Amino acid sequence: MSVAIDPRLCQGCGGCVEVCPGGILGLSPDGKSAVALYPNDCWGCAACLKECSRGAASLSLSPAMGGRGAKMTAFWEGGELFFKVEFLGGDSVSVKVDSGDPEDY
Ligand code: SF4
Ligand code: SF4
C-alpha cells in the first residue's frame, strides 16, 4: 500500500496530516501542499482519503492485494462518503461507505 498526494489538487489545508495516525504525511516547506514523507510505510487506513474533500490523497492498490495498480480516492456526494477506484485501463467504480454503527453487524 502506498499513499500519494496530487499537488495539482491539494490546497495545503493540512487536514490529512492531522488525521494520519502514523505521521506518514507532512506539509511541504512552503506549506502549499501536503507531501507523503514515508509513503511506503502507509498501512492504508484511508483516514487521509476520507479527510480530503478535494480527492488529492490517493492509495495505490498493489498487485499483492489484487488491485493491479488501481488508484483509490474518496469523495462526498449528497452527504454520503464514497470510495472511487480507478483501474489502469481507465474503468472506475465507486462504492458508498457504510456509515452505520460499526458494532452493528
Ligand atoms: S486534506 Fe487534501 S487538500 Fe488538505 S492538505 Fe491533505 S491532500 Fe491537501
Ligand atoms: S492511509 Fe492512513 S496511514 Fe496511510 S497516509 Fe493515509 S492516514 Fe496515514
Image: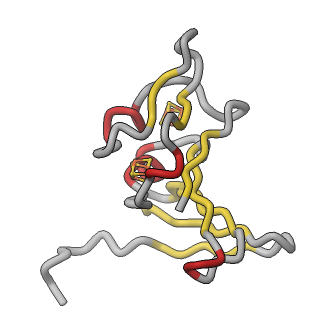
Residue 100 position, x and y percent, is: 25, 74
For residue 97, what is the image quadrant?
A: bottom left
Residue at the far left: name it: 103
Tell me how the rendering is colored: secondary structure
Residue 12 vertical position relative to residue 69 in the rendered view, above or below: above
Residue at 42% across / 40% down in the picture? 24
Residue at 56% across / 55% down in the picture? 2
Residue 103 vertical position relative to residue 50 in the rendered view, above or below: below
Residue at 60% across / 63% down in the picture? 72
Q: How many marks?
A: 0
Residue at the far top: name it: 30
Residue at the far bottom: name it: 105
> In this rendering, would 62 be left or right of 22?
right
Residue at the far right: name it: 89
Residue at 61% across / 73% down in the picture? 94
Residue 86 position, x and y percent, is: 72, 67
> In this rendering, would 22 be left or right of 49?
left
Q: Quadrant of the C terminus?
A: bottom left
> In this rendering, would 45 be left or right of 96?
left
Q: Nearer the viewer, residue 71 or 82?
A: 71
Residue 74 position, x and y percent, is: 53, 57
> In this rendering, would 26 be left or right of 68?
left
Residue 13 position, x and y percent, is: 47, 25
